Image (spheres, coloured by chain):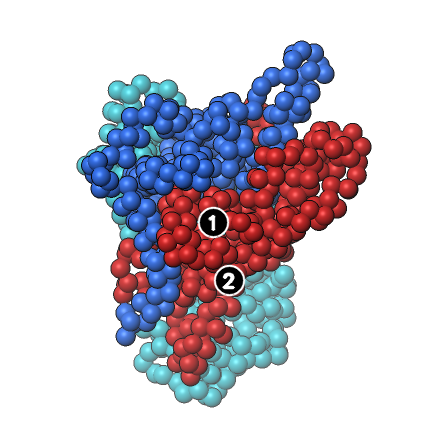
Amino acid sequence: MTVALTIDNISAQYGQTKVLENLSLDIAPGELVSLLGASGCGKTTTLRLIAGFLQPTAGRILLGGADLTRLPAHARNIGLVFQNYALFPHLSVADNVGFGLKQRGITPDLRKKRVAAMLERVGLEAFGERLPAALSGGQKQRVALARALVIEPPLLMFDEPLSNLDAKLRVDMRVEIRQLQRANGTTSVYVTHDQEEAFSISDRVAIMHQGRIMQLDTPETLYRRPANAFVARFVGFENLIPMQVRSRAGSSVVAEGPGGVQLTLSQDSYGKIPDSFVLACRAEGLSVSTDTNIEGIPATLGLRTYLGRAYQYQAQTPAGPLIAHGALSSPIEPGTAARLVPEPEQCTILAPE
Amino acid sequence: MKRFAGWLLSAPAILVVVLCLVVPVTLTIVATLGGPTGVFAPYLSFFASGFRRTVLWRTLQVSLLTTAIALVIGFLTAYVISRAPGWLKSILIIAAVFPLLTGVVVRSFAWLIILGKNGILNSALLSIGVISQPLTMLYTQGAVITAMVYLFVPLMILTLSGVLESIPDDLLQASASLGAKPSATFLQVILPLSVPGLIVGAVLVFTGSFTAYATPQLIGGESQMVMGTLMYQQAMVTFDWVSASTIATIMVVITITVVLLMTRVARRLNPLAV
Amino acid sequence: MTRSVHPALIVLAGLVFIFLVGPLIIVVGAALSNTTYLTFPPQGLSLRWFSKIFEIEAFRRTMVTSLQLALLSTALALLVGIPAAYALNRFRIQLPGWLSTLFVLPVLVPELVLGFSLLRSIAVDLDAPIFLSLVIGHTLLVLPYVVRVISASLASFDFSIEEAAISLGSPPLKSFFTIVLPNVRSGVIAAFILCFITSINDVSISIFLTGPGISTLPIQILAHVEQFFDPTIASVSVLLMALTVGVMAIVERTLGLTFLTK
């Protein structure tokens, strides 16, 4: 049974502080959507509202068309995986996993079978009798996952589930989570502050900031075509240059930026360019050339740092300080005059702020 | 060098405890052994006396009942406090702490006013016509237990509030998210996780009420003599110091056994400590 | 978090708080009575029983004794207890485990037994003066609070700060007073208050050690209650409660009350 989750215009506040205002979000059946943002952006609040640990001041939450908004947390039937695992320390692994089944009045015999099957799925069949304290972090996380999955909830939610694990385990676990979620086709909400994690695991990602969703899209679109400056900076477009179109010729556009910087951009690579726009480039999207006769942003190079795949330069330009990359074959000394040339593959066009 | 510094700094405190506590108490215990009629003669005569057996039995009864009642009342109250919103929580904690910081004498005295022959309870019952003669409430076991529960419930509330606060919120949320009703969360998560705290609280109340003096003296009097009041009587009224020492030793043995045994059990049962 | 609690539990908790606070309110009411016997509610209000306390010489004298005793034994306990707590935390690995148990012994041994043993050994066998015996008894009584509360504060103290001070040229003793002590200030205040209140309310140890001419206030109250049943005692009780309220106000001002639940 896969169902859709609809968050319809919810607002929430802690005391007098408004944390969410008129937030709406639609998640399709079987889809995994991440809520991504820095702490305080409202992602955890959203999760707590859906789980029923917090009451919205306005708005509705619908799961498979049924209104959950006024339902107490224990009646919502949502599987939740916590950041600190939240395993019951006094219960064995098997009893932890069976806890939800027990609440649902499942007979001990059947409970035992389903717990055993679930433990096998997460590779912990030999650990049923242990107490959580005797498990490693990764094993605890598997138990938490098994405990949430075994009740076969129509909605699964993850609250930064991997943030307490070391880097290697984090990568393994997220693949495992994704595989289990795919196999069950369970609609899922995944809260994280880790961009790589969100992008690798999700069908779509909602980037949140100050209680609002800045953009909800597939990881590919977010990464290549951010919709606004906030998302652009968030996904790594370090250089934002406001520009005005001066002339158009076919698909070619000549635009002028601060300090009279002139660039010729092709609408074949950038898509339609409005008269006023922001050119957003990653550091690797501005390549350094010491040939000062070519078209580009005039720059004086500053500090050079070695990144392994390229050199990175801090550059002073009429458009302000920018960050650019240069080839490993020819390191350039600080103080050299250069041109920074935008590479369309690593740059994008944003609407002005 | 470091070892030396550690000993030097703790030496005054060690001296105070050893010279003024360990030695005198040991001497008290030694005084009960090796009498002219055999090593354990004072104990044999203690247990041979029907009156003293009754006193010991009454003391156990009173302190166990006090512990049980304080445990139930204290736990439920602490639970309600733990669920209360922040501002109310502090008010409730203050209300619980205040009696604790008020002396035993004052708090026992309050029950003299309430339970006395011309006390408030009797006047109230007389005036609404439930009774026609004032009831004798003081100097009964019920009165002693009531006053002792009054004495120790705040301690229990404080101990258990600390324990309940230490249960992480997300365990309760996990329980709810798995479909447990509040009552099921209470019974299957909060209660088992509180067991070590309940044991600690029970030990505090039991040892406190087993060795109490002022409350049984004021509220129970001669007719409800307990180990504490009996010991005082033996030491200061009849000046039978061997007998008083015997009672003292029995009190020490029972309280220390209970403390050591139960704290060990509590430690073993504490899943949050691991 | 939905903090749903069954209404019956809330009612029960309400009753418990009436049970806790009610008797103390009754004592206050009785203290304000203008009758010569104890009643509640008071027939008429007066403060005459409060002035009566100060007319009775025994109350005046024991009140002074109790205050002296509480201050002196608290000071002594802090004096020996703070270095011990410091040593227990700073030199944990170098010291044996039983040492911390030794310092809680005064809590493990019933107060009555301690009082009686001090009477036998110190007051009678060594013929120590009554006040000295009381000071010894009360110092022992409050010492565990000092060690425990100061240890708790030191447990969260980062001793590398002290080492930093020493490496910067501050001598160890000076570093202790300028670096360590200010950081456990709240622990010292908390310990002081707990000790003071414990000492001033003590019955079980004092009952054996008080003697002709020297008594403490709680013991005097006990003796008075057994002879007279008048509102004087209620007034003394109210004075003691006022002292507690004062102390709690100081606690609230300096530390907040939450430290009591830790």
For label 1, the residue is: C209
Q: Is residue C234 visible?
A: yes
In front here: C142 or C214? C214
Say which colour chain A has: cyan
Q: Which residue appears at 78% of the width and 35% of the height?
A: C34
Circle 1 sits in a helix, a strand or a loop, which is it?
helix
Q: Is residue A184 above or below residue C213?
A: above
Give neighbour class at mark 2: few <14, some 14-19, many 20+ (Cα, 10 Å).
Answer: some
Say which colour chain C has: red
In front here: A239 or A190? A190
The N terminus of chain B lies in which quarter of the figure? bottom left
Q: Which chain is blue?
A: B
Q: Which residue appears at 36% of the width and 27% of the height?
A: B52
Q: Is residue C140 above or below residue B274?
A: below
A192 left or right, relative to B48: right
In front here: A86 or A232? A86
Amino acid type at circle 2 is Ala
C132 left or right, relative to A98: right
For label 2, the residue is: C75
Single out the mark in the foreground, 1 or 2: 1
Q: Which residue appears at 58% of the width and 65% of the height?
A: A278
The x, y position of residue B61, in whole percent, is: 40, 25
The answer as to whether the residues below labels 1 and 2 share one chain is yes
C68 left or right, relative to A116: right
Amino acid type at circle 1 is Leu
- Gap between marks 1 and 2, in whole Å? 20 Å
Classify residue A22 by image quadrant.
top right
Q: Chain of mark 1?
A: C
Q: Is residue A4 visible?
A: no
Q: Chain of mark 2?
A: C
